[in-house]
Image: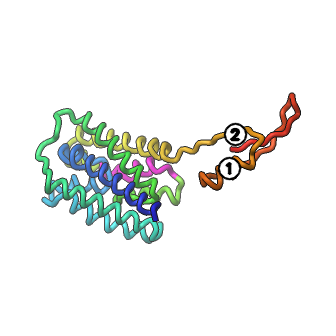
Amino acid sequence: MMKQVQSLLNITLGAFLIALNIHFFLSPNKVGTGGTSGAGIVLSQFLELPVGVIMFGLDMILFILGLLLIGPGFGLKSVFASLSLSGMVWALEVFHPLHNPISHDVLIQIVIGSLIGAIGVALIFNQEASAGGTGVLAKIIHKFTGLELGRAVLASDILIVISSAWFFGLQIGLYAFFGLLLKGMMIDRTLQFFNENKEVVIISEHSDEIKQFIVGDLEKGATLHSAKGAFSEDQSSRRG
């Protein structure tokens, strides 16, 4: 039960970080760095609908594909992440509307926003879910090709970047492409950080007591190795 609650909290935090990136950095500058958020930023200029509403509609279509190709376990968590993200973006648009960018320096906004958003995406991916959009396509690509998730996101977001350049100009398109590259690299680096494993080696004559403490009290895995000293010829046990 606690693991499920922790998972939902991580997904909520991830969605919040992505929403911050969309609302404060991407949308005011009309920079669509991929995903349904990028599509929403582009389409909102023509449909006159909030970005969050457009994201929600596109996500529901893509989640049908996710449920069919990946399974219900992925779908349930991802639906929660998608609804959280769309709702947070919509709430920020309603309660804290931005009519102009927060700074004249678009590049630094893209860098900071992409870093924040990439951490959010990685938090959600680490819970075997997706915040929707092309993240669903990325998970599908990853499942069937083994391509790293960050690169899969990059591959599935190229069309959104091209659309951003087409409608808002080459300079905005270049910013979007840079943000997309940065996001993809940061997702992979953050996932590697989350999934790092550490090994502790203990050499002792009291291997049974140590094993009991590691397995019973700490509830961690352990491997027992037998070794013999080259000089003393003494037998010893090593716990990893």
Question: Depth check: 64 or 218 in front?
Answer: 218
Quarter of the image holding residue 112?
top left
Q: Is residue 192 above or below residue 84?
A: above
Looking at the picture, how far across and down is residue 49, in whole percent? 15, 60
Viewport quadrant of the C terminus: top right
The reply, left or right, for residue 177 in relation to residue 222 is: left
Which numbered disc flags the more N-terminal residue, 2 or 1?
2
In the rendered image, is residue 75 in sight?
yes
In the rendered image, is residue 174 in sight?
no
> Which stretch did the figure color magenta?
147-161
How crowded pointer 1 is (Cα within 10 Å; few <14, some 14-19, many 20+) is rated as some
Question: Depth check: 160 or 5 in front?
Answer: 5
How crowded pointer 2 is (Cα within 10 Å; few <14, some 14-19, many 20+) is rated as few
Q: Residues under labels 2 and 1: Cα distance?
A: 10 Å
Q: Is the magenta stretch mostly helix, strand or loop?
A: helix
Q: Which residue lies furthest to the top in this view?
A: 231
The reply, left or right, for residue 28 in relation to residue 56 is: left
Quarter of the image holding residue 132?
bottom left
Quarter of the image holding residue 104?
top left
The reply, left or right, for residue 94 in relation to residue 145 is: left
The reply, left or right, for residue 140 in relation to residue 112 is: right
Q: Does the magenta stretch include residue 67?
A: no
Q: Is residue 154 magenta?
A: yes
Q: Residue furthest right?
A: 233
Instruction: Name which residue lies at 26% across and 34% down.
Output: 108
Q: What element carries label 2?
A: strand
Looking at the picture, how far across and down is residue 172, in whole percent? 23, 41
Report the disc number at residue 83. none
Q: What amino acid type should be assigned to the residue bearing mark 1?
A: Ala
The residue beneath circle 1 is 222
Instruction: Name which residue lies at 20% across and 33% down.
Output: 105
The residue beneath circle 2 is 202
